[in-house]
């Protein structure tokens, strides 16, 4: 009997994602929007970007202010090459959070059931 480790499971999931992405017609492109720089957040986003690259997904990172975030979301919603959008929370201005989340096209919002069903 083989001992199943967390690393084994993670590698299995990663390989499954590689296969799923390879079967798509176009390379998926994920846009991650954030509003602040901090060491922990930087490491976390670096891991997201690396995982995306490992499975064949292009990952773009955008650093926005409260004054530019809604415009960036509108631009990414209109960009047909962008297949998913994530807003890295918390935003610097907590008062813009609900507006920013609501501004994302539901078909591009990562985490909604409709997005998971398409994959």
Image: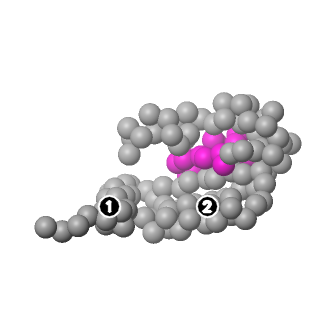
Q: Counting other residues with Cα less than 10 Å from the Cα at mark 2, is it few (<14), some (14-19), or many (20 or more)? A: few
Residue furthest to the left: 1
Relative to 44, say whether 86 is above or below.
Answer: above
Which image quarter: residue 93? top right
Nearest the eye: 45 or 29: 45
Vertical position of residue 94 compared to residue 80: above or below: above
For mark 1, does the 10 Å Cα neighbourhood hold few (<14), some (14 to 19), or many (20 or more) residues? few
Pinpoint residue 70: horizontal percent, then vertical percent: 76, 39
First in sequence, mark 2 or 1: give its number: 1
| Quadrant where the C terminus is found in the figure | top left
Q: Quadrant of residue 46?
A: bottom right
Q: Position of residue 77 (x, y in %)?
A: 63, 41
Dots 2 and 1: beta carbons under 8 Å? no
Q: Quadrant of the N terminus?
A: bottom left
Q: Nearer the viewer, residue 83 or 66?
A: 66
Left or right position of 25 against 88: left
């Amino acid at each position: 009997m083989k001992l199943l480790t967390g690393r084994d499971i993670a590698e299995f999931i990663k390989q499954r994602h590689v296969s799923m992405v390879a079967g798509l017609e176009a390379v998926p492109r994920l846009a991650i929007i954030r509003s602040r720089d901090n060491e922990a957040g930087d490491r976390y986003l670096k891991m997201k970007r690396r995982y995306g690259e490992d499975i064949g997904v292009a990952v773009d990172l955008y650093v926005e202010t409260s004054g530019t975030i809604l415009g960036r979301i509108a631009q990414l919603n209109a960009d047909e090459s962008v297949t998913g959008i994530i807003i890295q929370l918390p935003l610097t201005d907590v008062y813009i959070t609900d507006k920013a989340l609501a501004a994302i096209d539901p078909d591009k919002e990562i985490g909604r059931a409709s997005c998971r069903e398409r994959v």
